Image (tube, helix red, strand yellow):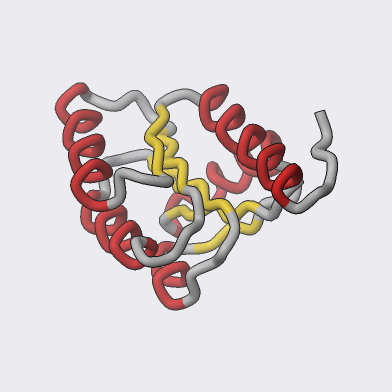
Amino acid sequence: MASVVVCADPSNWQRAGRFASRILGDAELRSFEDLRRRVPVQFILVYLTHPDYGHVRSLLEVLKPASPDVVIYYASRAAPQDAAQLGRLVGETRPHHTSLVFEAKAAAASVLQHSRSSGQKNGTAASP
């Protein structure tokens, strides 16, 4: 599998770590601050449990010139107004290479799809 960075607020590291190990296996867990300092080239999954628009906006702005694909996974039940505001934020800040999902299965599918396409681009076969 392609290298994946899971970004989470330190208060959510346990939940994000359990999700990452169960779904992704070898993902690296990093904070918003760490990602803003050192932008990775690989795929990023942002793990949210509450609307933290400031962290998300600043991270997406830092990633704008870079090319990593980003999936924002809102792991808790989002209120419709929170989901809409987060969608607007993504659309205004970094609409390309960024997707927003609200289900674990959708987050896993996005990561698996990315790992397959990365393997094909690098000339290697991706695992099914």
Q: Where on the picture, by quarter, is residue 111?
A: top right
The residue shown at (41%, 56%) is: 9
The residue shown at (56%, 33%) is: 110
> Taking 72 as reference, is 13 above or below it?
below
Q: Relative to residue 119, is residue 47 drawn left or right? A: left
Across and down, in percent, residue 69 comes to: 49, 49
Question: Closest to the observer: 124 or 32?
Answer: 124
Q: How many marks?
A: 0
Across and down, in percent, residue 65 comes to: 37, 66
Across and down, in percent, residue 95 comes to: 30, 44
The residue shown at (30%, 53%) is: 56
Q: Where on the picture, by quarter, is residue 78?
A: top left
The residue shown at (54%, 42%) is: 15
Q: Quadrant of the N terminus?
A: top right
Q: Relative to residue 78, is residue 2 drawn left or right? A: right
Question: Closest to the observer: 5 or 77?
Answer: 5
Question: Closest to the observer: 88 or 14?
Answer: 88
Question: Among all residues in the image, which is located at the extreme bottom?
Answer: 37
Across and down, in percent, residue 79 comes to: 22, 24
Q: Quadrant of the C terminus?
A: top right
> Taking 51 as reference, is 93 above or below it?
below
Q: Relative to residue 125, is residue 92 drawn left or right? A: left
